[in-house]
Image (cartoon, rainbow, N blue to C red):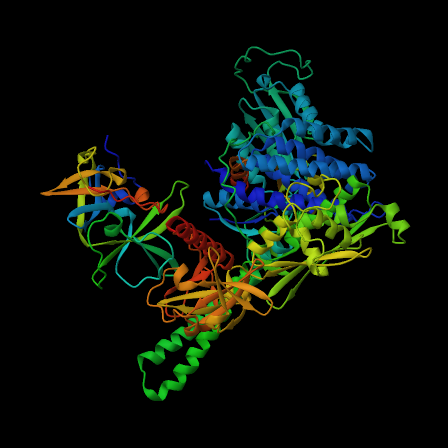
Amino acid sequence: MPKQPEMEHSDAESTRGQSASDAQFLAFVLGSEEYAVDILRVQEIRSWEPVSRIPNVNAYEKGVVNLRGAIVPIIDLRERFNLGLSEYTPVTVVVVLHTRDDSGKQRIMGVVVDAVSDVVDVDTSTVQMTPDFGARVSTEYLNGIVSVGERMVMLLDVDKLLKLDGGNDAREI
Amino acid sequence: MTIDMAQFHQVFFEESFEGLDAMESGLLNLDMGDVDEEAINTIFRAAHSIKGGSGTFGFTSVAEFTHVMETLLDEMRDGRRQITQGAIEILLGSVDCLREMLMAIQSGQEIDTVRVAGHKKALDTELDGQGNTTSTLANDSADQCLGESATVIMPATAVQGWRIAFSPHAHLLKTGNDPVRMFRELAELGELSVRVDFQGVPDFHQLDPEECHLSWDLQIIGDISREQIDDVFDWVEEDCDLAVQALTVQQPVTQPSGDVVKDRPEPVAESPEPTEVAPLKAELPAPSRKQHKPVAKNVPARPAGSSSIRVDTEKIDNLINMVGELVITQSMLSLVGEHFSINRLDQLKSGLAQLERHTRELQESVMNIRMLPINFVFTRFPRLVHDLSAKMGKKITLEMTGEQTEVDKTVIELISDPLVHLVRNSLDHGIEMPEQRLAAGKPETGKITLNAYHRGGNIVIEVCDDGRGLDKQKLQAKAIEKGLIEDNMPITEQQIFELIFMPGFSTAEQLSDISGRGVGMDVVRKNIQTLGGNIEIKSEQGQGSVFAIHLPLTLAILDGQSIAVGDETYIVPLVSIIESINVPEDMVNRVAGKGETFRLREEYLPIIRMHEIFSVENVRATKLSEGLVVVVEGQGVRCGLFIDDLLSQQQVVIKSLEANFRRVEGVSGATILGDGSVALILDIPGLVRLSNQQAAKAQQYYAETA
Amino acid sequence: MASILAVDDSASMRQMVAFTLKGAGYDVVEAVDGEDALSKAKSGKFDLVVTDVNMPRKDGITLIKELRQLGDYKFTPMLMLTTESGTDKKMQGKAAGATGWIVKPFNPDQLLKTINKVLG
């Protein structure tokens, strides 16, 4: 069974069009693959700005920035999943997401991606959970795969992805 | 209309706990000889409110339990019952029991019914044993009796309708009761006909328009009980002459109540005849109690962690004023900005100065909101001292000063346990037994003093006792026996006192259940240090001891020194900085597995190279001579931090790194600097741990590769 | 819509009463004790007062007595919220000029029914 993306906001219906199984996802590029997150989890999209480093953490945990008074960590997804070189230019994009941990506590985090492609409408009933289809990101962090026109887009599970237990989950292929 | 009563539960719990605290301190302060009426009234009122609230919110067991307490207190209040020490102890026990009941309900747990029953029995026994017991009867059973008697008088099914002669007294309107309201209610019960009697109306020149001179003859037909009629006139029975008369066909009213009428009476064609006139009795049943149904049990308890704070309205008003001023300054500045020219520079400067002042004041006021009087912690001690001294057979009075000293809410929450431990310690080990005190030429009753005051940016809380004081020789002997210190080591008085904070160190020959509860003074000190404070001991053998806790006023702001290490800026809490010095290379010793140390006066201090321990790039100073060593101290550990440079000193607002990330060793939090960037705040003990780990790793590596 | 002054020193009871009455469309002003209520009553005009009896600073009975002295509240309905099941308090209240009472514990429906009854 495909996992339904969580509907958290009461106004979710109106933003998702007529059909209840429709959901919108923000798609972005990591290396040569395309991923997407539930748009309701996206707080904002920012350009890269220098971070304050945090000592003795994983290399993909780039540091923290001040986001309107909150201390927000910035995670480089490209680095986390070994998806190519990380260069930081003013056009590098940071997607600010909110996540919820097991105890229901909400956190805000920024993830660095290569580029944001677009917002895609997904009929959630067409989401497939293929056991293993060779993506660089472990299936553990995926809610499924969906085809958008010619493209294959992998839906990321934001909560699991950003658990930040300090582990390193990139897969060697 | 359905209303989710659960939304009021949290407030109910909060106010009930406050009420219980008030009851407790009131009971403890009751002077048996000369009872202050207001004091007992305050205790009564708290019980009364809890009873009312618990009944309303459906916590029946609490309501029942509190009812017994209330009855007892009511009798005391009225002077019908003597206030005895025994009764006070029972009431104190009941306060505890009630608190546990409420806590159980709040957290969704089962109530310990056995314990509750035990306390209730004690209350009942007290209630029966002494004083006037009529009140219980008068209060509760009265309703039931009257309720029964009402049914006896008038089996409802027998009635066709009622005839009511209603003559209000002249003042009725001045009680806010409008006859029209009563007619409206009657009309809802059945078919009502009203005939007004103008006879009582005086001549116009004598007429007072605020008085009621009319009377009415009412007839109502329908299957209506006498109770329903009485309910309508319940509020005005004293303010009118009322005669209610049943309209029936047969069914004499005097029939014994045991006689059940099975069939409905035959419908009567003609107008029913009055058979009896029953003047309304003075004692009418209270509005039907059956209506009360306990509401929503098993309501999910709010998570215990949710916390709220009560803020003095004055503080809020103050805040609003400041925001107002800030808005004015802001609009002034934007005006200057819109039409800026160089000759308005002065205006801009003064505007900015104003902005700075307002911002600072606003910050102070906001911080002030989190400040609560230390009394929140102190209030539990009278009870503690009362109970424990009774248990140990000691005579002790407790004095408290500076209860209004304000301190941050977080400090309040975290300082409570260490303080309890210190007070227990004074009770247990400090104050001697009465006979010992007399033998030592001291007053029989010992004294414990809790004292709070501000000093500098700190709050100081002292726990003083006039007991036996610390026995230095005994402490030293014990420490030698335990191998904590060398036999012939020279040791200062303060160092001896410090011994009691060593883990596992306890001088009490036997662990008592008062203070020997597994947690020792080491935990007390650790907790205080976690709060950024420290504890000092002064003691004179035979005269007593003083334990003084020094704490920062708030945990939300600290005075920081910013330091530069490569591209990074870190904040070091100013309180932990001892000095900063240049350390020449030749003063440094390198020890395998222990890193570098240098000698500062009589001490060898480890050097922590910040850029190494935090892997910072682009450092300016790699040799000791190129940078600075800042000597810092935290939780009794000293070390030297090797950094590039000292920057400025500033007050910083502490922000949590864990809120969105996780705990990081060596870092206690983060803050936002003036330029909007983030700087991490260093945690000195954490850095020392980190440094030791890295040194150990390095040594392991060295051992493996060598 | 009619305006009601709700007086209780217990925040939970006060909030429950206010919430219930507001939900039914009444304008509700809350007061924390008799003193507070008296000053609020003087600075406004209410169609009904519903007050707890046992309160610090000024109890409900004294409040009612003092309100009745004011021209504005000569005929205003004033209800006591009382847990006292004995007749004492009720009688004291009546003597002070109370219109009637609502016996605690009560639920929102009972409260609303009584208030509606009085305000018509």
- Residue placed most toward the observer, B44 or C107: B44
Residue B424, given in percent of the width and then of the height, sits at 71, 47
In the picture provided, is B107 more to the left or to the right than A32? right
Task: Residue C34: tell me if it is visible.
Answer: no
Task: Residue B225: tell me if it is visible.
Answer: yes
- Residue placed most toward the observer, B695 or B367: B695
User: Which residue corresponds to the image point at 58% horizontal and 42% vertical from the top-left?
Assistant: B13
Dividing the image into 4 quarters, which one contains the N terminus of chain B? top left
Residue B457, given in percent of the width and then of the height, sits at 59, 67
- Residue placed most toward the observer, A84 or B232: A84
In the picture provided, is B118 more to the left or to the right than B264? right
In the picture provided, is B426 more to the left or to the right than B275? right
Residue lying farthest to the bottom in this orientation: B343
Q: Vertical placement of A47 versus B216: above or below?
A: below
Residue B197 image-quadrant placement: top right
Q: Vertical placement of B378 versus B285: above or below?
A: below
Residue B455 image-quadrant placement: bottom right
User: Which residue corresponds to the image point at 43% horizontal and 82% vertical from the top-left?
Assistant: B350
Residue B410, given in percent of the width and then of the height, sits at 55, 54
User: Which residue corresponds to the image point at 76% horizontal and 55% vertical from the top-left?
Assistant: B472
In the picture provided, is B108 more to the left or to the right than B538? left
Residue lying farthest to the left in this orientation: A150
- Residue placed most toward the observer, B706 or B208: B706
Q: Vertical placement of B296 versus B673: above or below?
A: above
